[in-house]
């Protein structure tokens, strides 16, 4: 999808995609271009959404493949990133799996909580309320 009139960079692109594609669907998946999903990932995310009807979205737990590091420094950086992800996931689990921010690598969201936000003629433009808008409350 190509964005139009987007002045909000990544937030604007996410908002435009959301506003364009979410209508008529129970869920919308967001996956980073460099993310590789497990074969059952989307099924498991959907099951989690069904089990947690008040959730606006759920995210996959993710990690880096240590074997992708071509040098000792690259492997060290991967190890450090994995520790950071593990720490964040552990914190979320301690909070009974509740978080206010979803990681963007692999998420499944529902438009239900967003129904109260007004639509706009120029999605992704400043002041347009949408899931990734800085003006949303």
Image: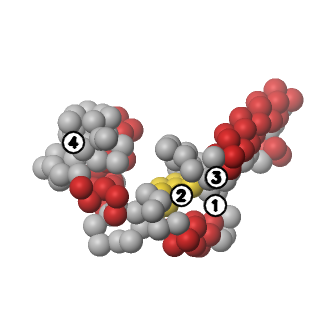
Q: CA distance from mark 2 to mark 4?
A: 24 Å
Look at the image and tell me in which quarter the N terminus lies: bottom left
Tag 1 residue = 37
Q: Is residue 104 visible?
A: no
Of label 1 and label 2, which has the lower sequence position? 1
Q: Which label sits in the foreground, 1 or 3?
A: 3
Q: CA distance from mark 1 to mark 2?
A: 15 Å
Tag 2 residue = 58
Q: Are marks 1 and 3 in contact (CB under 8 Å)?
A: no
Look at the image and tell me in which quarter the C terminus lies: top left
Q: Secondary structure at mark 3?
A: loop
Of label 2 and label 4, which has the lower sequence position? 2
> Quick one: 134 or 79, which is closer to the camera?
134
Q: Which label sits in the foreground, 1 or 2?
A: 2
Of label 1 and label 4, which has the lower sequence position? 1
* Marking on residue 128: 4
Q: Which label sits in the foreground, 3 or 2?
A: 3
Q: Position of residue 12 (x, y in %)?
A: 31, 41
Q: Quadrant of residue 9?
A: top left
Of label 1 and label 3, which has the lower sequence position? 1
Q: Secondary structure at mark 2?
A: strand
Q: Quadrant of residue 114?
A: bottom left
Q: Secondary structure at mark 1?
A: loop
> Quick one: 124 or 72, which is closer to the camera?
124
Q: CA distance from mark 3 to mark 2?
A: 13 Å
Q: Which label sits in the foreground, 4 or 3?
A: 3
Q: Sort mark 1 into few (<14), some (14-19) or many (20+) by Cα contacts within 10 Å.
A: few
Q: Which label sits in the foreground, 1 or 4?
A: 4
Tag 3 residue = 96
Q: Tell me how many marks there are.
A: 4
Q: Secondary structure at mark 4?
A: loop
């Amino acid at each position: 999808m190509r964005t139009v009139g987007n002045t909000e960079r990544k937030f604007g692109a996410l908002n435009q995609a959301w506003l364009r594609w979410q209508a008529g669907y129970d869920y919308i998946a967001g996956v980073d271009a460099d993310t590789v999903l497990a074969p059952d990932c989307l099924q498991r995310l959907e099951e989690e959404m069904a089990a947690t009807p008040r959730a606006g979205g759920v995210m996959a737990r993710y990690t880096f493949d240590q074997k992708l590091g071509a040098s000792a420094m690259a492997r060290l950086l991967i190890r450090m990133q994995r520790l950071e992800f593990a720490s964040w996931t552990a914190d979320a689990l301690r909070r009974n799996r509740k978080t206010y921010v979803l990681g963007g690598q692999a998420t499944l969201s529902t438009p239900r909580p967003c129904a109260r936000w007004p639509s706009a003629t120029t999605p992704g433009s400043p002041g347009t309320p949408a899931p990734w808008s800085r003006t949303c409350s």
